[in-house]
Amino acid sequence: MSGSSLATVLADRRVWLFAALSALCAATGFLLVPDRMALLLATQTGYWCVLAAFALFVWTLWRAYRENLARMRACGLAGFDWASLAVVGVGGMVLIVHESFGFKIVMDEVMLAGTSMSMHFDRNVITPMRGGDIQGAFVVLGGNLDKRQLFFPFLVSLLHDLTGYRVENAFVLNGILVFIFLALVNAAGRKLAGRQAGWLGVALFAGLPLLAQNATGGGFELLNLVMILATLLLGARYIERRDGASIAAFCYSAMLMTQVRYESGVFLLPVAGIILWVWWREGRATLPWPVMAIPPLMIHCALHTRIFTIRSTAWQLQSKPEFTQPFSVTNVPKNVVHALGFFFGKPTDQPNSYVLSALGCIALAFFILLASKKLRALSRETPISAANVFFAAGFAAQLGLMMCYFWGQFDDAIIRRLSLPTHLWMVLAIFAVLPQFPKPAVIRTLFGIVILGILAQGVPSMAAHAYNQEYLAGLETAWRRQFIADQPRKDYLVIDNDSVLWVAHRVSATTVDEAKTRREDLAFFMRTHTYSNIFVFQRYLIDADTGKMTLREGDDLGPDYVLEPVRQERLLTLTQTRMSRLVEIRDGQKVISNPGPDHVVPKDKAEIEKARAAYLENFLKRLP
């Protein structure tokens, strides 16, 4: 048997081995492990699996690009495209200077911040719900595994490891990612339609207020865009090189892409399509050994998804009681109307870009026709063009999934961010269509229109950010963070149903339900002056006709808790956000939080240490 034939057989065996390993790992993750054990294993192993996957991804990238890096070192600074670097730099600065850094989509971003905290301190992946200061050390006292994937909080935890723990590292990461994303957009545009097309793509995104909102937030949307586009570009490289280093980097990028957002798993369809197409053209399969580690490293993802079967609230259907299932084709017509309402809505209401929406919709229509034509002669297309055609299926599947989603209204303040992959598809469609208009004047005219759009709509919209003012949860989170910043010390306890935010800032916190069930313990802390203050966060709803204020459901501690307002503000019409101090706790008419009778402190050191140890043991048991 010849050497080439033997290599072919070995490669084929690797493919079968990979398929068998994938089936075994999928069965283990989705079926064989009991539900409760699945969540426990995901909690304990998730960090280490993502760490191993990320390390292997960096290694495969280095192997794939080491020749390019060597050539860059040989050429020095002379061969660098400084003009494109300047365009990316200016575009990124436009996106981050007009928005204030902070949590923009509270449900996702605060949970991700909490998960990064546990990854940093404990190397597990719970989202802390309770925490307290114990003799100067902040300790997480309880939490749950969150449904969100782990790659973003893992990267934030790496920043914690390198620079020290601070909640703001999530904003630092997104500030870095926005420049990486624009650089990738520039690279894709340059490959598809020339250097100026890359600049056009950067300008299109620089004028999108929605991207600015996410670039200055703590969410995973930018990382999602980076990984989708990076995977597309690595797919193009694999089509061009067809070697083991390229497919390894391509596969690991795809693997990590699926660990940013759940729905990004649909992009595995074009990934698999590209690999099979290359194998078919080559007449053989190539699968390097590093790829074999992917199925075991993905088991934790399968275990993690079991959260949707264990917790009925994971789909958040309770937020819209009129829906009974998360996905249905019956949702498509209404969601399409909402999508159009976002893409072409008023800039004061929606963080959109008329220029990108208009050019993107026109380009998508042409691109779909163009892609069907390219499919018939795909082997004659450039690698980046072929990869773009394959990934169109992924973008279409992602958009279709969002249109079937019960909460898939793109004009909703919480859901707008889910339109970002569609914005990326629009820009890639523009890149694909531009070569059909080879005259230089076309792209220059478009560039002028885009710059005009940035000046006329993008910058004013980002500067005013009126579209943020309707999202009360975001306003209240910023209000809470200002309250934290205003306190000279963190030796206080907060009772708040959104306790994760406080715990992530290393402030002792517990939930309202926990406080109500542990009334005696809170009274003990008040008697012993454990905390300088105990604060309670609440929201009041105001009746427009009578002016009567009603406490939001779930915020009421009950009549035994006596509160004194210390700060309140009307952040949104007909609501009042209030922070109160817990003054005393009663049991009927009896006050149980007042200090007890005086007693004599023992003089013997041994007795003092014994009393201190007994108090500490009792203190730990009573922590809320």
Image: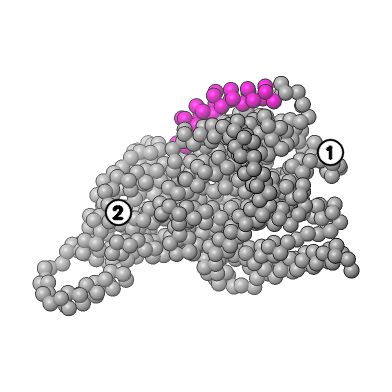
Magenta residues (range): 443-469
Q: Say left or right for 168 vs 609.
A: right
What kind of element bears circle 2?
loop
Q: Mark 1 is on which residue type?
A: Lys
Pointer 1: what residue?
Answer: 373
Considering only vertical position in the picture, is 121 above or below 371? below
Query: Residue placed at 61% from the left, 28% from the top?
Result: 354
Rendered location of residue 593, percent (x, y): 21, 62
What kind of element bears circle 1?
helix
Rendered location of residue 488, percent (x, y): 26, 48
Pointer 2: what residue?
Answer: 490
Considering only vertical position in the picture, is 508 above or below 462? below
- Which of 608 and 534 lies nearest the eye of the viewer? 608
Query: Residue placed at 77% from the left, 52% from the top?
Result: 242
- Which of 465 and 192 lies nearest the eye of the viewer? 192
Query: Residue placed at 21% from the left, 61% from the top?
Result: 529
Overall secondary structure of the magenta section: helix
Q: Within the magenta stretch, is there residue 150?
A: no
Bin the neighbour count of mark 1 within 10 Å (Cα to Cα): few under 14, some 14-19, many 20 and up. few
- Which of 572 and 150 lies nearest the eye of the viewer? 150
Rendered location of residue 142, percent (x, y): 41, 65
Considering only vertical position in the picture, is 434 above or below 249? above
C-alpha span from label 1 to label 2: 63 Å
Q: Say left or right for 615 vs 96.
A: left
Determine the image quadrant of residue 53: bottom right
Rendered location of residue 50, percent (x, y): 57, 60
